[in-house]
């Protein structure tokens, strides 16, 4: 599953929409930080557009595999320009994937959450 996460990161950093589309199952679901489920194609467009290209790095990966399925979660740092200024977003992402008939892994579910600071609970 770490290979799948690294392939995802590589495609995002290269703004490779074709690879990302091939990685997603036809019925893939993307859940944003608020629990909305916009079309996965919109997530691909959002994550791969902008100048300079968005850059993502992952850490603290965890995963588990079963026969033909698995999940991976990781912390991420995403750098991008917003309103002409460089910004860095941090968060956690979780991915559920299944192995397609041809042997390739396809992402069924992506959930992205932004890091939050809550007074009195988190640092």
Image: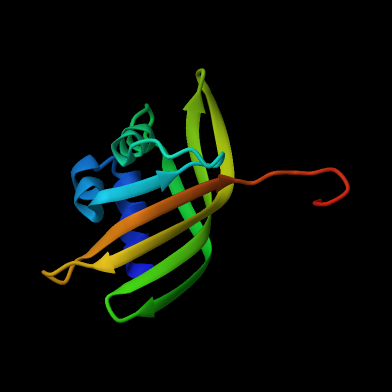
Residue 62 vs residue 103: left or right? right
Name the colouring of the figure. Answer: rainbow
Name the quadrant of the N terminus.
bottom left
Give the vertical position of 99 relative to 57 (above or below): below
Residue 9 spot, x, y in % from top left: 37, 53
Work out which residue is located at the far right of the displayed protein and give it: 120
Q: Quadrant of residue 42?
A: top left
Residue 20 vs residue 59: left or right? left
Residue 94 seen by the camera: yes
Q: Which residue is depicted at the point 58% across and 49% down?
A: 91
Give the vertical position of 54 relative to 57 (above or below): above
Q: Quadrant of residue 41?
A: top left
Residue 1 seen by the camera: no
Q: Quadrant of residue 88?
A: top right
Q: Nearer the viewer, residue 10 or 25?
A: 25
Residue 86 spot, x, y in % from top left: 54, 29
Q: Which residue is depicted at the point 80% across and 51% down?
A: 122
Give the vertical position of 19 relative to 52 (above or below): below
Work out which residue is located at the far top of the displayed protein and give it: 83
Q: How many marks?
A: 0
Residue 82 spot, x, y in % from top left: 51, 24
Give the vertical position of 103 relative to 36 (above or below): below
Work out which residue is located at the far left of the displayed protein and give it: 102
Residue 79 spot, x, y in % from top left: 50, 39
Q: Which residue is depicted at the point 75% across and 44% down?
A: 117
């Amino acid at each position: 599953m770490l290979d799948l996460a690294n392939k995802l990161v590589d495609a995002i950093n290269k703004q490779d929409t074709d690879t990302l589309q091939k990685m997603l199952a036809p019925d893939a679901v993307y859940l944003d930080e608020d629990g909305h489920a916009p079309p996965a194609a919109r997530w691909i467009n959002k994550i791969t557009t902008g100048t300079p290209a968005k850059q993502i790095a992952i850490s603290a990966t965890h995963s588990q595999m079963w026969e033909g399925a698995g999940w991976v979660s990781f912390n991420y740092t995403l750098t991008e320009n917003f309103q002409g200024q460089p910004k860095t977003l941090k968060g956690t992402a979780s991915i559920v994937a299944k192995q397609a008939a041809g042997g390739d892994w396809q992402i069924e579910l992506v959930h992205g959450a932004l890091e939050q600071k809550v007074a009195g609970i988190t640092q």
